[in-house]
Image (spheres, helix red, strand yellow):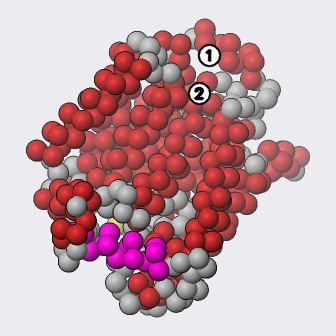
Amino acid sequence: MKQIFLVFKSIDWLLFAVTLPLLFAGLSVMNSFTGESQYYERQLVWIAIALATFFIFSFIDFRFLRSSGVLVTLFLTVIGSLTLLFFVAGVVHGTKSWFSIGAFSLQPSDPAKLILILILAKYFSRRHIEIADIKHIIVSGLYALVIFLLVLFQPDFGSAIIIFLIWLGMVLVSGISKKHLLLVFLMALAAFLAMWSFILADYQKQRVLTFIHPPADIRGAGYNAYQSTIAVGSGELSGKGIGYGTQSRLKFLPEYETDFIFAAFAEEWGFIGVMILFALFGVVIWRILANAFYGATNFEILFGLGLAIFFASHFAVHVGMNIGLLPVTGVTVPFLSYGGSHLLTEFAGLGILMGMRRYRRVAHKEAMKNEFLGV
């Protein structure tokens, strides 16, 4: 009983509490128009499972994740599951990204992002003072590249972008030099040109071209982005009210439960609601960073920083594509969008952070010393 009390005491309850209105915001949009689609009911099930995962993970001592053997096993498992998709997964919306389990589906690319954060945290934690050596940038990039390519070939361009941003963000916080940063951007440009020539499908190229010149194909590839910006703008100051978002109700805005849920939310809640949403996400990022900086070792610190990058990337890319600042890539927004895979990943990540929070003060100084010395 005492152990349970200590675990619950160690949870960052402000961080947990802020996720609840975000979950409610997503549910409010889904419940407005879903009717018989069952998105709302299924999301309630996923939320219950995700919250249970958060509390279960909060009880676990995650120091075992410092073991290279454990992380290599997790990495190979992710690689295997992503590879298996090409052989057993059905095509949904033009991609082979989901394992179907009855009425539910799981998307391996979501937990793959969390595993990548752990792998990079482990790698950079031992080489933090050597990051100026470009070989560490290349080696860490190879870890990310394997997952990036397997996701890209599904094809899931949105998740691939998030994987790249996680790697880039963790390289930056690890202390990359300016000349190496320039080299990274040149490599990214070369990779994009190669993808444009040999990998990207025609519809993906069209989305990029439409982003550059939106009016070029409003009735075709630019339709979704155009309707999304209309929805965001029509919310005005206070919104149209829950259940009165005409772009969603009349089905002008497609995939509003997932890819365009921010636009649907903005239409119903307006500018005031959007500002509250931004503030809530700001608190989430702040609390993750605050917990990260008290990590017991470099590994825990870098994991927390990577987790913050994960949430910030998802939020920024999703909002950017909903307001016409970025091409439409099908990226979910944390906590709001429909789907179990991303919810489980998000709360599993927060649960791991809470598990690490339990031993952050006891081992901090000595473990940091051992980390730098490679003990």
Q: From what the image shows, is residue 310 above or below residue 117?
A: below
**Residue 263 visible in the current orientation:** yes
Q: Is residue 144 left or right of residue 24?
A: left
Q: Residue furthest top?
A: 373
How many numbered badges does the structure rendering display? 2
| Rendered view: 153 above or below 262 | above
Instruction: State the residue in front, 168 or 222.
Output: 222
Q: Which residue is at 63% across, 71% downward?
A: 272
The percent position of residue 280, horizontal first and vertical second, equals 65, 59
- Identify whether 375 is placed above or below 193: above
- Residue 345 location (% of width, % of height): 51, 53
Q: Is 290 on the left-hand or right-hand side of 94?
A: right
- Name the residue that disc number 2 marks: 299
Q: Magenta stretch? A: 221-234
In the image, what residue type sits under mark 2?
Phe
Q: Return the residue nearer the eye: 262 or 234.
A: 234
**Main secondary structure type of the part rendered in magenta:** helix
Quick one: SS at disc 1?
helix
Q: Residue at x 43, y 77 (%)?
A: 231
On the image, the x and y values in percent for residue 174 come to 51, 24
Q: Residues within 10 Å of mark 1 (few under 14, many from 20)?
A: some
Question: Residue at left 31%, top 31%?
Answer: 185
Query: Percent from the top left, x then y, of residue 16?
Result: 71, 56
Kindly indicate the quadrant of the structure image that contains residue 256. bottom left
Q: Residue at x 20, y 77 (%)?
A: 219
Q: Which residue is mark 1?
A: 371
As drawn, is 110 to the left or to the right of 17?
Answer: left
- Would residue 163 appear left or right of 223 to someone viewing this image? right
SS state under label 2? helix
Residue type, label 1:
Glu
Q: Mark 1 and mark 2 in contact (Cβ < 8 Å)?
A: yes
Seen from the viewer's position, the closer of residues 167 and 53 is 167
